[in-house]
Amino acid sequence: MAEWEREEISGRIAASIPVRAKLGKPLGGQAPFGYSWKNKQFVINESESPIRKLMYEIFLRTLRKKTTADELNRLGHRTRKGVLFSDTTVTRLLKDTNAKGERIANYTKTSGDGRRATLKPKSEWTITKCPQIVSKKTWEKVNRILAIQESRSARLGRKSEYLLSGFVKCSCSKKMYIRTSLKAYQCRSCNIKIAVVDIEKIFYDYLSECMNSHYLARQVKNTEGILQKKQLLLEETMNEKLNLEATMDSFIAMRMDGGITRENFIENLHSLNTKLA
């Protein structure tokens, strides 16, 4: 019963988050640098906002995140925790949409097991207006520059000379690596070797067979049979789930009416939850 009540409370809290976000209410945590929560209102922090604005001005002049951080530190400015600004902090604050007057809330979720938060679909995000630190034009100009810089800094991995490099495995399940001097794949565990030309011929022959219409038709037929079996299994599982949920509802109703003891209710509910899991 206690577990059920906890789940009910958690559900109500989760349902209230989008509503509070649309009303501009705090959802927990500190306001970003340059802002504060005052009487549950998201307002400009008079001591931090000039530093946040200066950050945009320095970046537009230098076009360098590290230089911007160094200049802020040289002028004696520090983060809210009293530490030096870093290029990572500068990047995060330059990208933060609060500065242009758009506060994004309800955009992350946690699994509840202590792992890092993940982004929700954009359709679930809540965007509300907030006080601006810089103009929208300035924010967009800075972020266009950041996007260009990030696209230029992306590095492609070194292309392999061999078609199947990284994909060939030995019969012992270990990866086989290219021995350039031998032009062969070699297993470092059992020392088995296979020439590059041989394994590539096997691959090309298999690929040719796959392109054969008879082979494809046979594969499609086999796949359809597997899908039908999976579909039947899914339907059986869903029916069983519905039956278990109906049984659970009846136990809850009996408990609410006093027709079953607390101990029996908990025992049956635990058994049903185990089956549903």
Image (cartoon, rainbow, N blue to C red):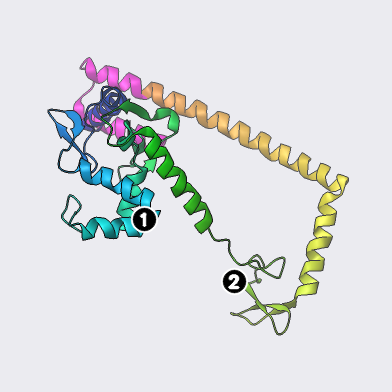
On the picture, is 139 further left or further right than 215? left
- Helix, strand or loop at label 2? It is loop
Q: Which residue is mark 2?
A: 174
Residue 53 spot, x, y in % from top left? 27, 43
Residue 186 spot, x, y in % from top left? 66, 78
Label 2, residues with CA under 10 Å away: few <14, some 14-19, many ≥20: few
Q: In this orientation, which residue lies closer to the viewer: 202 or 260?
A: 202
Q: Is residue 180 above or below residue 79?
A: below
Residue 10 spot, x, y in % from top left? 26, 30
| Magenta residue check for 215 | no
Q: Quadrant of the N terminus?
A: top left
> Based on the displayed image, in which of its 4 quarters is residue 30 positioned?
top left
On the picture, is 73 further left or further right than 141? left
* Residue 100: mark in rendering: none
Q: In this orientation, which residue lies closer to the viewer: 65 or 244?
A: 65
Q: Quadrant of the C terminus?
A: top left
Residue 12 spot, x, y in % from top left? 27, 24
Which range of residues does the magenta coloring cover? 248-277
* Residue 65: mark in rendering: 1
The residue under the point 80% across, 66% down is 202
